[in-house]
């Protein structure tokens, strides 16, 4: 059974994903972070083939603060 909240960020298959709503508690629907609805995939949880864990990101470094012009 899925214990992942809709909208939470997870890491699976070597990338980060957003948890999407699913009609089945055994099917975890994931959209790639920065991806579109056409890239949604499902992970059938009872098979235990894919490791799904919370996604974590380092906090911003205040020493490199800037605005959008800094990056392009």
Image (tube, grey):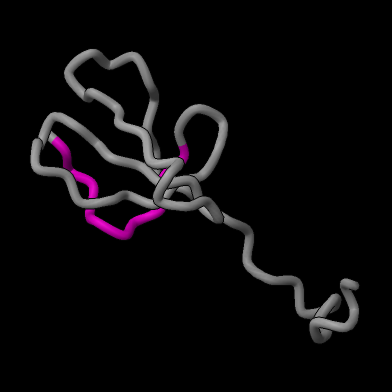
Q: Residue 59's x, y, as percent? A: 63, 67
Q: Is residue 46 left or right of residue 57?
A: left
Q: Is residue 61 left or right of residue 4?
A: right
Q: Considering the image in quadrants, where does the C terminus appear?
A: bottom right
**Does residue 56 appear in the picture of this structure?**
no
Does residue 1 sit above or below 68 in this rendering? Answer: above
Relative to residue 47, is residue 10 depicted above or below?
A: below
Q: Residue at x 41, y 53 (%)?
A: 9
Horizontal side of residue 14 vs 22, given as left or right: right
**Taken as a whole, is the magenta stretch helix, strand or loop?**
loop
The quarter holding residue 65 reads: bottom right
Q: Residue 10 colored magenta?
A: yes
Report the quarter where the N terminus lies. Answer: top left
60 displayed left or right of 26? right
Where residue 62 sits: x, y (%)? 77, 79
Residue 12 forms part of the magenta stretch: no
Q: Is residue 69 above or below residue 41?
A: below
Identify which residue is drawn at 30% across, 31% down: 42
> What residue occupies the far front of the structure in this picture?
38
From this viewpoint, is residue 7 visible?
yes
Q: Nearer the viewer, residue 42 or 4?
A: 42
Please state the total of marks drawn on the protein image.
0
Report the magenta residues as a range.
Answer: 2-11
Residue at 28% of width from left, 51% of height from top? 20
What residue appears at the point 17 percent right and 18 percent down from the top-left corner? 46
């Amino acid at each position: 059974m899925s214990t992942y909240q809709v909208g939470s960020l997870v890491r699976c298959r070597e990338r980060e994903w957003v948890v999407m709503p699913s009609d089945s508690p055994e099917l975890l629907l994931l959209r790639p972070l920065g991806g579109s609805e056409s890239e949604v995939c499902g992970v059938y949880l009872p098979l235990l083939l894919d490791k799904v864990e919370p996604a974590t990101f380092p906090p911003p470094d205040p020493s490199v603060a800037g605005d959008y012009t800094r990056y392009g």
